Image (cartoon, grey):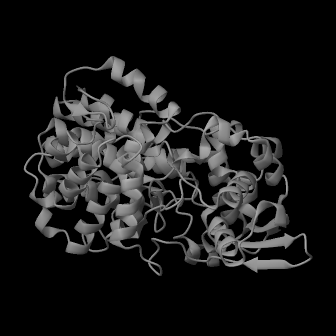
Amino acid sequence: MPIESSEQSCSETLANFVANLRYEDIPAAVAAKARTHILDSIGNALAGSTMEWARNGSSVFRKLAGPPEATVIGHAGRIAAANAAIANGIGIAALDYDDTDYGGGGNHMSRHVVATALAAGEAANCTGKDLITAVVIGYEVAPRVGASLMVDRYGVRAARATWGAEELAAHHRMHHEGGMLVRAYVPGLYSSALIAGRLFGLNAQQLTSAQGLVGGLGLFLGQSHREGADSHVHAAWAAHSGIIAASWAHDGLRGPRLIYEGDRGLLAVIGKDLHDATRLTSGLGTEWTTLKNVLKFYPAGHGPHHFMEALKSLVIEYKLRPQDVLQIDCRAPAQRIEFHFEPKETKLHPTPYNARFSLPYLLARLLADGELGPLSFTADKVTEPAVLELASRVTYTADEASWFGEQRGEVTVKLRDGRSLVRSAPELLGFPSRPCTREDVVSKFRANAKLIHENPKRTDELLAALESLEKIKNIRDIMNLATPG
């Protein structure tokens, strides 16, 4: 039932946490994790800025310009912070190479968390420590908002064990109908408002209003994924909206204090009969969800990564070539078949956008090239006849018993010589059981930066600055290096 009470609301509890959190309160491992994600996000945005859809998406906001407050990564000059935030969010998201929250409901958080923190932080002349603190705030708030809506794909296993058929059906319906609305955009609205509010110096009362004000901004539906349209802008809107809402609150506008638990608030309207308000504030400052955020090492939707990793290991071990392969069958969780295999015509003839979510294309491209990188999704690549023919040989077997977060990425490769090779990849690089190294992160960053930095010295300088972020007195020193030069 919705809560109407004079006691401290959820937004007030979150506002107090945000207003009072100091850099010194953040465990070293959490601060280091946030720094890694800042570095990774800037690298992704540098590479993303070279892609046509990202250039087209951000150009609108570069034209709108405004006061020279913040940098658009990969471009010269500064524009208004809110416009820079959405432009950078588009850049971070452009390659689908950004992080994934595997512990809660935040999904691809850097698209709004890091984008907001960089733009608002540059406008506020913040320090490196301020930036890290703001990013930690985002990574603590966004997953909790998503978890309160029971949309965390992986954290509800215990609940599912006790749910009845109606509750399971409601959960599946929320995923199917809500799309990215509840898994990325909605959590990003509230975290972005709090990030910007913290960096703009708002007090707890103003931070409460910022959450209330941002609650009415924007909507994203899942049809773009169905049609292969360019929808990398959706989560970035949260960054833009958060800065606007924080600015409104700074200037005295008052937002509702029961924006989450009120009878017309987020949980009642979006969560309907399946939500849990306690998850909004549980463990604040003691259970650090930042640590559950993982990096990507393939520039594609995270669901197919298990299958790509399994196929790649077979390609390396058996030196497989496209002409050796008769068929590749994926044992796929039933909930993900629609997303990665259907509609069949779209997945077998993808656009540069939805090729990143098409398992037939991804496995065919990987088999053809031996790797999958930022340049694997150009218009020429996704229409290459030999690869599309190979993609037609990728099939699936529905695994009704497997849940998305429990998948093993099992592939069966049938060879023309009669052999069948079976391989699974239950853990990916960057996961807790298979942690990535500094070298993994730096290698990815350098490969991304190389797409725009002709002089490797500029990449070296940017990397050095990001790796000593705590010592930076003004993050403009970093953002100056995140341009072509």
User: Depth check: 447 or 90 in front?
Assistant: 447
User: Depth check: 323 or 11 in front?
Assistant: 323
Q: Is residue 262 above or below residue 129?
A: above
User: Depth check: 352 or 280 in front?
Assistant: 352
Residue furthest left as drawn: 473
Rendering coords of residue 40 (x, y %): 36, 56
Rendering coords of residue 394 (x, y %): 81, 59
Q: Residue, x 55% and y 69% (percent of image)?
A: 154
Q: Is residue 106 visible?
A: yes
Q: Is residue 394 above or below residue 422?
A: above
The image quarter in which residue 39 lies: bottom left
Q: Quadrant of the C terminus?
A: top left
Rendering coords of residue 387 (x, y %): 76, 49
Please indicate whether residue 350 sits to the left or right of residue 181 in the image: right
Q: Is residue 261 above or below residue 378?
A: below
Q: Is residue 396 visible?
A: no
Q: Residue, x 46% and y 64% (percent of image)?
A: 104
Q: Residue, x 60% and y 70% (percent of image)?
A: 405
Please indicate whether residue 48 sits to the left or right of residue 20 in the image: right
Please indicate whether residue 479 sits to the left or right of residue 99 in the image: left
Q: What is the number of callouts on the image?
A: 0
The image quarter in which residue 86 lies: top left
Rendering coords of residue 18 (x, y %): 21, 55
User: Depth check: 366 or 163 in front?
Assistant: 366
Q: Is residue 167 above or below residue 412?
A: above
